[in-house]
Image: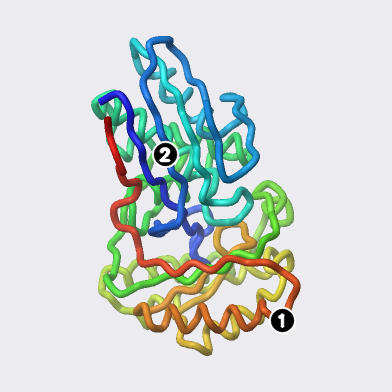
Amino acid sequence: MNEIRVFSPATVANLSCGFDILGACLDKVGDELVVRKTKKKGIVITKITGQELSKDITVNVAGVSALALLRETEVDCGFEIEIHKGVKPGSGIGSSAASSAGSVFAINQLLGKPYSNKELIKFAMEGEKAACGSLIADNVAAALLGGFTFVKDGLNHDYFKLCTPPELFFTVIHPQIEIKTSDSRAILVKEVSLEKMTEQSANIGAFIAGLYTDNYELIARSMVDSVIEPLRSTLIPKFNDIKEISLSNGALACGISGSGPSIFALSKGFSTANDIALAMKKVYSKTDLEYDIHISPINDEGIKIIKVK
């Protein structure tokens, strides 16, 4: 195998009750990366489509994560990377994670898979650090493991995959504005009350219990964020209107995807997810904002191989 094309999916992080802890993997929307072996050692980004991004491997997150992998891996070749962006930077659905995870997954495949997908997370996190300044694992873990994921301790590489109920769908609306993760983190408070901590702990525990028992009602009443959402939602146009109309059209929950501006609604069944998409369109059609809407089942596989040579 000398060349590989992979699909690296978009992701939804936090899921309201699990700030920097929970992630979920989407299907159909994401980046495609082509990676090929070269005789000359090193990493070169040869092509980027879809977005205007730097090809500097010390700046581009795909290059940063790839370099992190090669620092710990003996290789007798180099790699060229093409990045075809399907996820806009600053969208809140894991743009940097898709590229960071995609490059290390592809290189690992070309090397004969010396690392498991779980072991690749620590390299992909370096790309996330380049993007937002922090070693965050929630998005890259979801992209590499698939399904719902839980980060117990990202710095000590303690993360794992959760159960995925079969009927869950995401509806994600992405207003075409950019909110940098670093900026959205800057407005957060550094301390919360004991009452809020207890409430969030109870919510995340109940949410996980709901996943493992297919208890959709429990999932719905657990996805509540009284700490982060009130602050970040002020940065997102019509957030409260989108949330209200999503819930009134059958959503189990609705919240901010990652650091925003994308807003997710989680629902049971495609029909409900589609109804929510139509309702979301009605809200934004009354504004001057351009937007995208994605309806997606949970991608339980994560990054997928499209083609090898």
The residue at the point 51 percent across, 21 percent down is: 44
Mark nearer the viewer, 2 or 1: 1
Nearest the camera: 128 or 93?
93
Three-letter code, disc 2 = Gly
Q: Is residue 14 above or below residue 84?
A: below
Q: Is residue 74 left or right of residue 137?
A: left
Q: Is residue 18 left or right of residue 5?
A: right
Residue at mark 1: 286
- The Cα atoms of the two marked residues, 2 and 1, are separated by 37 Å
Q: Position of residue 70 (x, y in %)?
A: 41, 20
Which quadrant would the N terminus be assigned to in this image?
A: top left
For residue 109, what is the image quadrant?
top left
Would you say residue 306 is visible in this rendering?
yes
The residue at the point 48 percent across, 71 percent down is: 171
Question: What numbered label is drawn on residue 102?
Answer: 2
Q: Position of residue 69 (x, y in %)?
A: 41, 25
Q: Is residue 73 above or below residue 217?
A: above
Say which label, 2 or 1, has the lower sequence index.
2
Q: How many numbered marks are there?
A: 2
The residue at the point 41 percent across, 34 percent down is: 34
Q: Position of residue 235 (x, y in %)?
A: 73, 64
For label 1, the SS is loop
Nearest the camera: 147 or 108?
108
Q: Crowding at label 2, few (<14), some or many (≥20) Cα neighbours within 10 Å?
A: many
Q: Position of residue 162 (x, y in %)?
A: 31, 58
Nearest the camera: 63 or 221?
63
What color scheme is it?
rainbow
The residue at the point 52 percent across, 84 percent down is: 247
Three-letter code, disc 1 = Lys
For residue 130, what is the image quadrant?
top right
Which quadrant would the C terminus be assigned to in this image?
A: top left
For label 2, the SS is helix
